[in-house]
Amino acid sequence: MTWDVRGLDERLVRDTIVYILAPLALAVRHGRHLGYRVDRTAIRNTLLLSLFVVPFYVVGSSLPTIRAYYPMWETSAALGEFLPHAAAQFVVALAAETYYRGLLCVGVREIGFKSVFISPVVYAFHHMYKPPIELMLSGPTDVLFGAVDYKSNSILPSVVAHGVGLGVLDWLVLHPPLLAPERVVRWLSWLPIPI
C-alpha cells in the first residue's frame, strides 16, 4: 500500500508485480494452486455471478457518490479511448482477484470453506478511500466472490464479474443514468451513509 501510483498505467505495473507476479511466485514456491483454471463449473458460475452483480452496477451508476468517484482514471465514451481503458481495468481486476480470491481463498482451500472469510477485512481495508456505499458492500462482496470461487476451484467467476463490472460501471457513469438518481437515493435513504 506504500507504493503510490498516479495513473492507470502505473497502477497496471504495480498491480501486476504485487498482486499477480508475487502471488504466482509464492504459489510456485509452495506448490499452491491459485485458481487459474477454466472448466464447465467455472464457466457456469462465472455467468451466474456476473448476472447477479450487473444490477448492482446499474443501480450504483445512478448514485451521486459513485458518479462523482468513477471512472477512477481519465477516459471518455469514445470507443477508441474507452476500450483500452476497460481492458486495463480488466487487468487490474485480474490482479485483485489473483491476490484476494486466488492467494487468500483458493490457494488455501484445504482449510475448508472458512477460507472465504480470510480476505474480507483486508479487502475492505483496501476500499476505505472509496465511496461509503462501496466500502459497506466490499465485505459481503468479498465473501460472495470467495464462496463462488471456492466452489468453482477457479478465480474465473470473480475475475469476470469484477473486470466486466468495472467496465460496465465506467461506461454507465460516462452516460446519463439509466435510473433516476433521485429515485435510487430515495430507495436507499434508509442507509446510515452518504449515497
Image (spheres, rainbow, N blue to C red):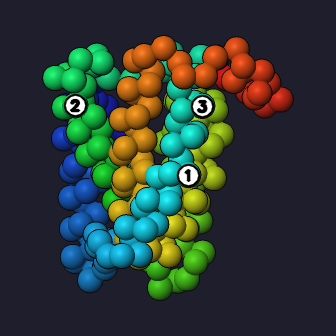
Residues under labels 3 and 1: Cα distance? 12 Å
Q: Position of residue 7 (x, y in %)?
A: 26, 25
Task: Give the vertical position of 124 relative to 82 (above or below).
Answer: below
Look at label 2 and name its amino acid: Leu
Which residue occupies 29% across, 73% down? 37
Which label number is shown at residue 89? none
Quarter the N terminus occupies: top left
Which residue occupies 25% across, 56% down? 20
Look at label 1 and name its amino acid: Phe
Look at label 3 and name its amino acid: Val
Within 10 Å of disc 2 (Cα), the crowding (few <14, some 14-19, many 20+) is some
Of the numbered discs 1 and 2, the one sitting upstream in the chain is: 1
Residues under labels 1 and 2: Cα distance? 23 Å
Position of residue 195 in the picture relative to residue 3 (left or right): right
Mark 2 falls on what kind of element? helix
Q: Position of residue 137 (x, y in %)?
A: 62, 43
Which residue occupies 51% across, 43% down? 54
Question: Residue 106's image quarter?
Answer: bottom left
Of residues 40 and 66, the one drawn nearer to the viewer in this rendering = 40
Quarter the C terminus occupies: top right
Q: Position of residue 38 (x, y in %)?
A: 29, 72
Q: Which residue is mark 2?
A: 83
Which residue occupies 83% across, 29% down? 190
In this rendering, the count of numbered labels is 3
Of residues 22 and 183, the one drawn nearer to the viewer in this rendering = 183
**Quick one: which residue is furthest to the left in this view?**
80
Residues under labels 3 and 2: Cα distance? 22 Å
Q: Which residue is mark 1?
A: 52
Q: Which residue is mark 3?
A: 59
Position of residue 105 in the picture relative to residue 23 (left or right): right
